[in-house]
């Protein structure tokens, strides 16, 4: 394949390290994400998945290594500057603004790029309300939503900033099976809406990851131990031993 | 206006401060110095002095904001509250020790609030002036809160880190809100001290800062009108009780305040709104 036909990666992480008081949470991780790719990031508790996500986003300062986003080294940038360049993060624990209404929360998600609330934003907010299935709850205080709805609201807020790369940290945590299925549809819909949008999803639920991901990265004790299609990863002996709990 | 200015940053921005009187009393000192000193273009007439005093309070708010919100480790929550407490304490001690500021006695002001033949210094004239400024401040703050920065400010109250992660510069928004608040508190302080004809160290200190916190709590934090109502009620109550019970009026006001704050957690306005909804 010629260089012209290979799209440049959206994200290039090289030798990334993050330590907490001597404990190595992320240990020399390297990975790339292509435009439009949905990547599942799995691993046992304490494997370093969330730390990796937050270090790439700039919430944690990396101790070594580099992060390039759309070709630019963003290692020295604050999280808000990475957000302005097109990164979006949805937390494991929902962190919507509880006293504000659903619509006000979405408006906040829409504002950083648009500069000010305008008619165009109102259209985008209407579309997002439909996408996240919260049209009837638009005036409800976010704190009064069910857990799954709060998670969808947070995804909606992230979408309104039109991210090129969206990080979802355990989006189905605490959800019912029906809510998880709806969330899978929502995530698949993100790419249908904008084919060049990439998504990295951190999850424990491997079946959920199998439903949505093009590629799966497995972490164990701060390192990447497997990277590939879900079937290949499932068959990997090291993954079976360290994460899926099967031996021999 | 003083209570309204505090409600903007505490009620809507979540910035608890024990030093808001620094702007109120500080502007009082500035207007006193500008109208009583004989130096260069001084003394100024009353209105330019009031305008400059309000701007000086806004400038002080910018300095505090730059240190508190724009440094390498921005201050939040209790840390910010403690720093403002220290600022209020230092300003009060400085005012007591400074001969330029009149020491313990403060500075007497002799200028009057007049517009041509119209006296706004006492009686109805003063109340009209205060009401016009209050309504103007209320409209200004409401417009600010309805705009982009105002919405972000209310989100900062809920979760400042999340606001940053969405791509906003939370420190800049806090600086803008704090400067607006400081300027309004300064304008209120300048007018109040010209009307009162004296400014003394207590005006910049912890006591005055705590009193305005009480007004906001009693009226209903985050309501804007509640603190205004509470200020009027509390000042009227204080004046009435101090005339009736010379020895025990402060204790009586204190007990009433505790009862009101415990019984009305949403403040007077919150209680009234809930009552109307039932």
Image: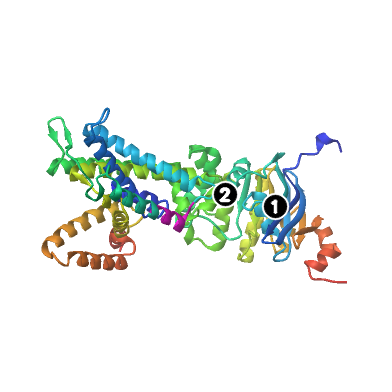
Q: Chain of mark 2?
A: B
Q: Residue at x 27, y 28 (%)?
A: B40
Does any portion of residue B18 appear in the rendered image? Answer: yes
- Residue at which label 1 appears: A63
Q: Residue at x 66, y 52 (%)?
A: A55
Residue A217 found in image quarter? bottom right
Q: Residues within 10 Å of mark 1 (few under 14, many from 20)?
A: some
- Residue at which label 2 appears: B165
Q: Chain of mark 1?
A: A
When the figure is inspected, residue A219 is found, relative to residue A32, above or below; the finding is: below
Q: Quick check: do tags 1 and 2 share a chain?
A: no
- Pick the residue in front: A40 or B182: B182
User: In what element is the residue under mark 1?
Assistant: loop
- Pick the residue in front: B218 or B60: B60
Q: Which numbered disc covers residue A83?
A: none
Separation of disc 1 and disc 2 at Cα? 21 Å
Nearer to us of marks 1 and 2 is 1
Asked if disc 1 and disc 2 are in contact, CB closer than 8 Å, the reply is no
Whether residue B179 is in magenta: the answer is: no
Is B71 placed left or right of B267 in the picture? right
Is B68 placed left or right of B101 in the picture? right
Range covered by the magenta-colored residues: B75-84
């Amino acid at each position: 394949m010629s260089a012209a036909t290979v799209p440049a990666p959206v994200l290039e992480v090289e030798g990334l390290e993050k330590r907490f008081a001597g404990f190595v949470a992320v240990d020399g991780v390297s990975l790339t994400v292509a435009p439009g790719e949905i990547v599942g990031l799995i691993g046992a508790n304490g494997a370093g998945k969330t730390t990796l996500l937050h270090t790439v986003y700039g919430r944690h300062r990396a101790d070594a290594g580099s992060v390039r986003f759309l070709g630019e080294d963003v290692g020295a940038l604050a999280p808000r500057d990475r957000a302005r360049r097109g990164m979006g993060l949805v937390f494991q624990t929902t962190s919507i603004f509880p006293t504000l209404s659903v619509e006000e929360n979405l408006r906040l998600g829409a504002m950083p790029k648009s500069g000010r609330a305008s008619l165009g934003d109102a259209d985008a907010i209407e579309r997002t309300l439909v996408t996240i299935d919260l049209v009837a709850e638009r005036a409800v205080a976010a704190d009064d939503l069910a857990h799954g709805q709060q998670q969808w609201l947070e995804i909606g807020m992230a979408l309104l900033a039109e991210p090129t790369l969206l990080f979802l940290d355990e989006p189905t945590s605490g959800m019912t099976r029906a809510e998880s299925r709806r969330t899978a549809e929502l995530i698949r819909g993100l790419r249908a809406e904008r084919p060049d949008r990439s998504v990295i999803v951190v999850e424990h639920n491997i079946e959920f990851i199998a439903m949505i991901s093009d590629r799966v990265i497995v972490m164990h004790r701060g390192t990447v131990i497997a990277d590939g299609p879900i079937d290949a990863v499932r068959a990997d002996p090291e993954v079976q031993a360290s994460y899926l709990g099967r031996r021999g | 206006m003083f209570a309204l200015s505090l409600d903007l940053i505490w009620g809507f921005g979540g910035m608890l401060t024990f030093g808001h009187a620094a702007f109120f009393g500080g502007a009082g000192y500035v207007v006193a110095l500008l109208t009583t000193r004989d130096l260069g273009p001084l003394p100024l007439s009353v209105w330019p002095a009031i305008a400059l005093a309000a701007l000086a309070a806004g400038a002080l708010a910018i300095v505090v904001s730059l240190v508190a919100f724009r440094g390498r480790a921005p201050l939040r929550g209790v840390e910010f509250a403690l720093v403002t407490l220290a600022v209020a304490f230092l300003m009060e001690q400085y005012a007591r020790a400074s001969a330029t500021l009149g020491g313990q006695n403060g500075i007497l002001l002799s200028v009057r609030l007049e517009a041509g033949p119209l006296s706004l210094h006492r009686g109805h004239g003063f109340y009209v002036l205060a009401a016009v400024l209050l309504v103007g401040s209320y409209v200004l703050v409401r417009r600010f809160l309805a705009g982009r920065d105002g919405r972000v400010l209310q989100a900062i109250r809920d979760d400042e880190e999340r606001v940053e992660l969405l791509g906003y510069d939370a420190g800049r928004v806090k600086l803008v809100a704090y400067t607006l608040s400081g300027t309004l508190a300064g304008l209120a302080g300048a007018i109040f001290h010209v009307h009162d004809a004296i400014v003394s160290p207590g005006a910049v200190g912890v006591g005055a800062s705590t009193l305005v916190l009480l007004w906001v709590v009693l009226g209903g934090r985050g309501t804007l009108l509640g603190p205004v109502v509470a200020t009027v009620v509390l000042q009227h109550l204080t004046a009435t009780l101090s005339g009736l019970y010379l020895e025990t009026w402060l204790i009586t006001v204190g007990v009433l305040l505790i009862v009101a704050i415990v019984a009305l957690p949403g403040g007077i306005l919150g209680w009234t709104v809930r009552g109307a909804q039932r």
